[in-house]
Image (cartoon, rainbow, N blue to C red):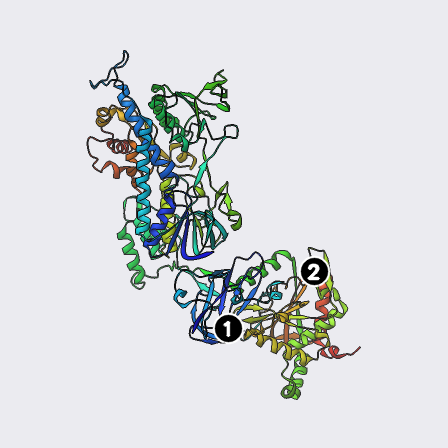
Amino acid sequence: METIRTQLLVIGSGPGGYVCAIRAAQLGISTVIVESEKVGGTCLNIGCIPSKALIHAADEFHKLVSMCKSDENESALGISAASPSLDLIKTIHWKDSIVSRLNNGVNGLLKKANVQIFQGVARFRDGKTVIVSKDSEETQIHCENIVIATGSEPVDIPTLPFGDRILSSTTALSLTEIPNSMAVVGGGYIGLELGASFAKFGSKVTIVEFSPKILPQYDEQLTRPVHEQLKKLGVRVMTETKALSYSQPEKALRIDSANCEDTSIIAEKVLVTVGRRARLQGWGLEELSLTTEHGYIAIDQHCQTSMRGVYAIGDVTGEPMLAHRAMAQGELVARVISGQSASWDKQCIPAVCFTDPEIVSAGLSPAEAEALGEVYSVSSFPFKANGRAMSLQREDGFVRVITQKETNIILGIQAVGAGVSELSAAFSIAIEMGARAEDIAATIHAHPTLSEGLQEACMGAIGHGLHL
Amino acid sequence: MGLHVINLSDVGEGVAEAELVEWHVSVGDTVGEDQLLGVVMTDKAAVDVPSSVLGKVVKLCADVGDVVAVGSELIQLEVSGEGNTPISKSSGNQFEPDAQPNTDINPDSSSLSKESPTTATPTSESDSPTKKEHNNRNTRTTTKTTTKSTTEQPAFAQSPPANTSPAKVLAAPSVRQRARDLGVELSTVTGSGPIGRIVHADLDRYTERRAQPGTSGRQPNTNIDVVKIIGMRRKIAEKMALSHSRIPHITIVEEVDIHYLEELREELNDKHADTRGKLTILPFVMKSIVEAAREQPELNARFDDEAGTVAQYGGVHIGIATQTENGLVVPVVRHTEVNSLWKNANEVRRLSAACRDGKIEREELIDSTITITSLGSLGAVATTPIINHPEVAIVGINKIMIRPFWDGQQFVPRKMMNLSCSFDHRIVDGWDAAVFVQKLKSLLEKPAMLFLED
């Protein structure tokens, strides 16, 4: 067996892994990265990127459909369209081309940084040695430091095993035709993003959520505009409803609902999005006896695990399972290994939900501020009073700022509205820089933009609202 | 000329890595076959790494304190002939550790079977009047000097949450990073920004002031050196913790009038020091322990608390707590019951020297049945010795001082010495402990009693 020696071995080339590898190599550390599939991980191949592509296609298609003249609905813009059609195979091809461009991009960046890429499945032999196997060939990689970035995978429901008509988020992104009906089991952000897209493509979509509300991590104020949009799209939302099993011949999902008497839903396809779990199996975690907590690898403020020289980043280390958290961790670990003084001291990890309308959250929500015993105030600014929102025909939603009462330090910012994902940078910068509401209120925000909503909310927080 | 690479071989079952604690050679040295190259320490034992060939050291592949994986390269030697590694590859990435299994080091497996021979033994303090220095480069390595920011999360906290509570210290990320690089605790910096926000200028001022301590009075020293506890120090720490947590100690301090003992000792030294060696107090204490243990064999014992058995020994094997550069070790004088005063004294002398020179054999460090600890002239008025697990008693010798003594009519100056003895209270009752200590006292106060042959 061939043996390779390196200073750093990164297992998994998702956003965390590849960022870590590139930065480490830039810092002069000899780096090897192992990937069993295509580089880019879940995010790039079967997650963030392809789903956003699909959402965009669905939005475009839906715009056209809504411009078709009908009795109840005439386009306010005076535009009319006639019978738009969709070739999903082409749509999926376009989406795949974006994924493949990014694959090549990541590959190129890794090569440019002199990272050695190893295709194959990694398996730990001990804390310093990993065997990579591909087909029947094995290579032993011996390293000083290891970064575990194996990511996460969708959780399935035993009575609804993935396959055939039961879709995971991965297979839902590769359908070749739009199903007439679709049941989405799990009303979290993945289910809602994809469910709403298929509704826009023309499927009859039903969301089946076990808990009393969809998007349970967000408060009712933030989810209400999403609810309203779902209603407009004709999506049925069933909360406190349990998905039991699927009958192939009847194409029906059997359910048990606390809110209605229906016992089944007609669904040509069932999309199961009930969560993701850390990928802890298949790479030899047993050999290392690393400390785990609640099914995730426990890490310290340097992302080091319970074993010296073994680091873990990204989804495998738990919530929030977000690509940009993994990237930040990856960069941090590269710096730690190169001997720099780096430590996790981030003040916020923004989260974006690409539902319609989008939801952004950075820092503390009112409930979280409450739980921490903060004395805080809340100031919101609705897009109804924003010129740009009007001109975009999307006046639903608002920006909300949570400030510490005594100091006006910004503790958290949330927003819901079409296109607000692009405001997330402003939100996290404000919190990371330790801004007060006064700072944002005194910063000129370009007009007319949705971002004025942030300035207005901050003005409101110090009692000087202008446009409300 | 060829290159011979010595890898760290399998050092024990289930051990994937070992800590390099000593190098005995440096680059450029010529080493012979079987010459000691270095020492690695696993969780179970310290293992010598000898050379398998004759050659010249060209590269040490690890630093002291490094954890080396089993099978990885430890040292490169230049040898005559072909060596085991093509030179062209020596600096490259690839080689085959499995190709030359005979070049691996084969540590004596017997040294792995028990706990580490260099494992130190607990005593309240340790015992060398010639203790040289506190820090030793072989046992302690200083890692990066860092001061922890208050915003850091505790080790092994669950991964960073999405919504972090705002830090008490308000500063932009670049300011926080610069503070970390400077080793400045941000909470000690006064921020000039709104509501005390710390900006770069505040850090400038802070570091300027720190650089000129005279100008603005004494600055608090916020420097923290994080010293890694490795090698023998770690073993000592583990053993101390074991002894102290497992054994409920009872300590008795008793005063001993050693006037007559000192007279006798002086006389014996005058007469025999030249031919038989000099006597310290120690061999007399050893002899009195032998006598006392004759009457109370339950104190010359090892307690296996897991098996629930106490092994009482016929032979009195006395451990002598000894300070070395690397820390505390306890060599053992075997069968003190058959030795003369001088034999015991010379044995103690020989063993301590061997410990300090690092030449002590593993067999000389194990299986003591009772231990003596003495700090010589540093010996204090009283100490609370920690028992050398799994023994049940330890005798601590305190400093000899001239103290006023009431002889019935007046105070007279008298050479006095305290004994501080600890006992395992699970096995030894206070009564028995007191009887033992009284026996030692009476023997040492009337040293003639030590030499009654029965």
Q: Nearer the viewer, residue B60 or A435?
A: B60
Q: Can you tell which of label 1 and label 2 is closer to the viewer?
A: 1
Provide the residue designation for mark 1: B53
Please determine whether, in this image, residue A273 is positioned above or below residue B127: above
- Residue B358 occupies quadrant: bottom right
Residue farthest to the top, as pictured: A71
Residue A78 x %, y %: 20, 18
Residue farthest to the right, as pictured: B454
Residues at discs 1 and 2 both on one chain: yes
Provide the residue designation for mark 2: B303
- Residue A29 occupies quadrant: bottom left
Q: Earlier in the sequence, mark 1 or mark 2?
A: 1
Residue A401 x %, y %: 32, 33
Label number found at residue B5: none
Q: Amino acid at mark 1?
A: Val
Q: Amino acid at mark 2?
A: Phe
Q: Nearer the viewer, residue A247 or A70?
A: A247
- Residue B282 occupies quadrant: bottom right
Residue A113 x %, y %: 31, 52
Separation of residues labelled 1 and 2 (CA atoms): 45 Å
Tag 2, which secondary structure? strand
Q: Chain of mark 1?
A: B
Q: Nearer the viewer, residue B103 or B258?
A: B103
The reply, left or right, for residue A382 in relation to residue B358 is left
